[in-house]
Image (cartoon, helix red, strand yellow):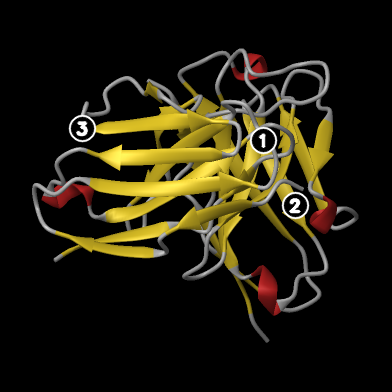
Amino acid sequence: QVQLVQSGAEVKKPGASVKVSCKASGYTFTSYYMHWVRQAPGQGLEWMGIINPSGGSTSYAQKFQGRVTMTRDTSTSTVYMELSSLRSEDTAVYYCARLRLGYCSSTSCSGPFDYWGQGTLVTVSS
Amino acid sequence: DIQMTQSPSSLSASVGDRVTITCQASQDISNYLNWYQQKPGKAPKLLIYDASNLETGVPSRFSGSGSGTDFTFTISSLQPEDIATYYCQQYDNLPTFGQGTRLEIK
């Protein structure tokens, strides 16, 4: 069965970086794009970016450009999201979410997220 | 970015009631609209994709409709386990989510 298992909770100081992992199993890792979505406490869902696990290409939300880096390791079927220059407003649960197959066009790769990781709480506090 | 306006922000209904949530896009998104259910402390779960298609395994009391800019999500007969927050998500371009609707039992 498809599973996305994320790394554990993190506590970071302002200005630091955090790297969250998302290990996939139960399907062909390189066949499905992966998105990252975050949710601040008591707030809604915010899209951060996407990575193609096959070639490693990425696209980030403008809000996070310059601060976020998404990478992958095909040998372990794991994607990573690193966010730098952390501030208190980055306190949130971070989710990886798999994009359903067949939703990539020449201009975008977006559609229904059919499987989600369990979420990783990142707390930024001095 | 395409803005999604979801309403109401919260809703209280009785078991067995018909519940409707709406989502309006700031521009035409065809049928590029999904609905998710999120229970406290859990990840969102896909319920409806492409505006009106029921995800496999999701009870048939859930449904979605609409196209263009106006979309509706309906629970035909509310059950206690449906207590959650519901989000719409557009994917015409970069994905964006509605603000969410918190559903409570009256």
Which of label 3 and label 1 is nearer to you?
A: 3
Q: Residue at image x 14%, y 41%?
A: B77
**What mark, if any, has residue A79 been given in the picture?**
1
Regarding residue B56, the answer to whether it shows in the image is: yes
Nearer to the camera, A45 or A22: A45
- Secondary structure of residue under mark 2: strand
Q: Is residue B40 above or below residue B66?
A: below
Residue B52 locus on image (x, y percent)? 42, 25
Query: Mark 3 highlights which residue?
Result: B61
Q: CA distance from mark 3 to mark 1?
A: 35 Å
Q: Chain of mark 3?
A: B
Residue B23 locus on image (x, y percent)? 50, 47
Nearer to the camera, A18 or B88: B88
Q: Is residue B56 above or below residue A24?
A: above
Label 3, residues with CA under 10 Å away: few <14, some 14-19, many ≥20: few
- Left or right: residue B103 versus residue A63 is left
**What mark, if any, has residue A82 been given in the picture?**
2
